[in-house]
Image (tube, coloured by chain):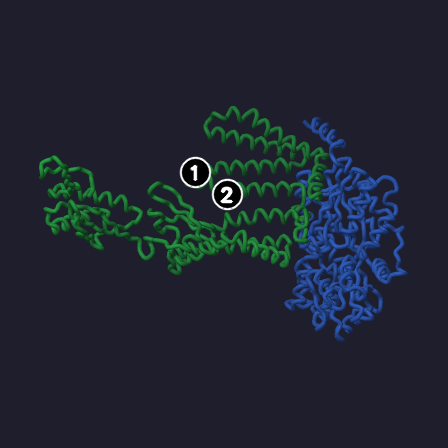
Amino acid sequence: MGGALTLFLGLGGCSSGFLPDTLFIYVENESSQSRQAEIGDSRRVVQQLLEDFEQANPGVRIRVRHFSSGAIVPATAYRTSRALGPDLLVTRVVTALRLNQQHLSTPVRFRGKGLEEIHPRFLAEFRLADNRFLAVPLLAEPQLACFNRQRVPDPPTSLDQLIALSAKGMRVGLPLAATDLYWTASGSDAEDSLQALLESADDSAVAAPSFKATDQRRLLGWLNWLDNANQQQNVEFAEESIDLVERLGRGERDWISCNSLWLGRLGRQMKGSLGVSELPGADGQPATTLTRLKVWSFGTHSSPRQRQLAQAFVLFTLNPVNQRRMMLAGPGNVPVNKEVLIPTKSSQRYAAMAASLDHSRMLSFRHPERVEQRVGQLHDLLRQLIAGSLDPNGVIQGLTDQAGGAPPDQDTP
Amino acid sequence: MDMLLLEISGWLGYLSRPLVLLQGFTVAALMLGYHWGVQPRLAARPPIVRLLGTLGLLLALRLGAELLQALGQPSGLVEYSVRLYAIWQGLIVARVLLARRFGAAPIDRLYGRIIKPLFLLSLAGSLVNQVDSLEDFADIPLFPLFNEPLTTGGLVLLFTIPYFLVVLSEFPVAWLGALMQRLLGFNKGTRVAIQLVCRYVLIGGGFLWVLHRIGLNANAIAAVAGGLSVGLGFGVKEVFSNFISGLWLLFEGSVGPGEILFIDGDPCEVRSLGLRAAVLWRDRDNAELVVPNQDFFTKTTTTYTGSDRMRRSQVDVSAAYRHDPETVIRLLEQVALASPRVLPQPAPKALLLSYGDSAINYALRFWIENPMNNAGIKSEVSTAVWHAFNAEGIEIPFPQRVLQQPGHREGTIVAMPGETG
């Protein structure tokens, strides 16, 4: 039986003349709920890429399907269980790693110099010991400050200045997600503690790490800043980043923390009023941000021909010409190909994005489920902090309870 | 439309995957083997054996899925076909059982109008969902409609929602009508009217929702409404007039289901009052009459069920001159009272109508409960009158005519039975 099956699978993999060469691609959208949130620019860019690739490979068809971030893993699992899963997926890093953990994507080996041009710091996270890649970076999306230039001629360069400007009437919008708020921790000298908290490889399923006193103190400082910001009349927190983007677009906010992926949408809404800068840190230094990457993953049940086409298409999207084209067509995209020059001198926007990338880190997603769980736990605690039902010490207590560690030092200022 | 065809043809790309083919062949081999090899042999066997055969096929499909899993291969398509076939067979078995409990006709109607269309719709959606994102598939633009692209999802909504609104709205509306009747004490006609209006509102609202959902803006809907207005003025004036007449009549209560109307000399029962016409049942020949609602609205209608359901009936009879009219009248009234389907109150009344050529003419008037039974009750009463007259020696005389012919002896009388004077 096993031999017959092997023979059948071997024969079935051959490309037959009457069947079209079709490549199925799933794309993860930004929002956890909406399918439409991110489509605007990326769809146009992707469509152009597809047409170019199909032109270069006659007879090949590419089908792209968009899913919200909450739906893409279940949808892939559902169809993969029928061998009808995608050949390629474009997702965030955490999603790509979760797909890999659930055996919904498969690592691939690129022969030759295919990935040599990719910036090593983007690629290192995905390289396996046997030189295969469980995902391949496509584009980087740095975190930025987006603001209305008519209302904010000079954007804040430090967290203290941000609060001071809000006191003078600048309406500030901040996200509630811990990863989106990471940059505020850098201004409070707590980014290492926060990163350690999120990345900790504790084996317990629900436990966060037991904090050291230094980490507690730094995190408490950060939480006090958030609590202080929350007390300001002109500072508002939002559950979803897209809410902030919409409010800035409608003129209800003057300055928000945003991701570069929203720049196209904001540019259309605000025209010349849209200003972009690095996020403020401490002492006039820019904040340290978390880099977001969009990555390619490979499906598990592709035929040999589909796998070959998928690899060719990935390399096609990574070549300097197409990376540059994607950068120019999608105003929030930063290429991962180091051979592509970013026009920092001619464009303030690209300068801000490049600078933000230079001051950014990447979260290690070796344990994506755990990182997501911690992000979720911290999100819940921050929500309670913003709602006033917990104070900063209460948040630390909550983190400690989840860790099962020692209670916080009550004397800590 | 090109995009839809392109999309569907793109699904063929999955056939280049060996694991998809393997699952497909597994399902096809088992299904075809059963239908060609096993099913013909079971055709003449009792239903329980055929059911066991079906269960055997399901078991074989399930084992096929288990085998693929044991070999470390995906088996979702085989499992999907197991579920699909099980649901289909379950529906067949349920149909048989329900038909035994509630009768074949209503269950056939339920299956034909609701279960089968729902199953087919779910099946189509489910099949698309196996290979594609339903949401993306629904967003494929087909062609422009009032300057808005009509998508695949919109087209499906445009056909299915109105159908299911018409078919399914009957049930909640009937429940609501019954509830309101119980709470507010409506009569049957008002209840039916409220149900009908609620149903039309539901269907109309649903249709507007569909138009809005498929992307028709308010201007386009206004344009449709404007077109309809012109249409109402010309082509569909009669339809609209009948529709309004029907609603009016229902609220008025003069013509509603269960009412007895006199149409062309026959009592007819109203079976239903529809969008355009009323359906009436004529007892005499079991015919159903379809009468436009507007006829009732513009012409005189005789009803036996306006304020009550009683009808006064009358039997005409003659008795010979030699019998005392008071005796005859008393006897007629006694006969009517003795008749089981004649109401005692109001009391039957016999009258001397006129002196005829050969006899005195009487009328026996009495009340009956159901207007539709008039002919039968009249027959019963007439028969009883004959028996009563016969028992009392009261003659119902033949008409008599005296003919005198030249040459015959004067005073000869020739009676001509059957001739009326």
Nearest the eye: A387 or A141: A141
x, y (%) of residue A34? Answer: 68, 54
| Mark linked to residue B113 | 2
| Mark linked to residue B104 | 1
- The residue at 12%/43% (across/down) is B394
Which quarter of the image is occupied by the N terminus of chain A? top right
Residue B297, quarter of picture: bottom left
Q: Residue furthest front?
A: B407
- The residue at 42%/37% (across/down) is B100
Q: Which chain is green?
A: B
x, y (%) of residue B177? Answer: 43, 55
> Which of the marked residues, 1 or 2, is nearer the chain's N terminus?
1
Marks 1 and 2: CB-CB under 8 Å?
A: no
Q: The blue chain is which one?
A: A
x, y (%) of residue A119? Answer: 86, 50
Amino acid, disc 2: Arg
- The residue at 79%/56% (across/down) is A141
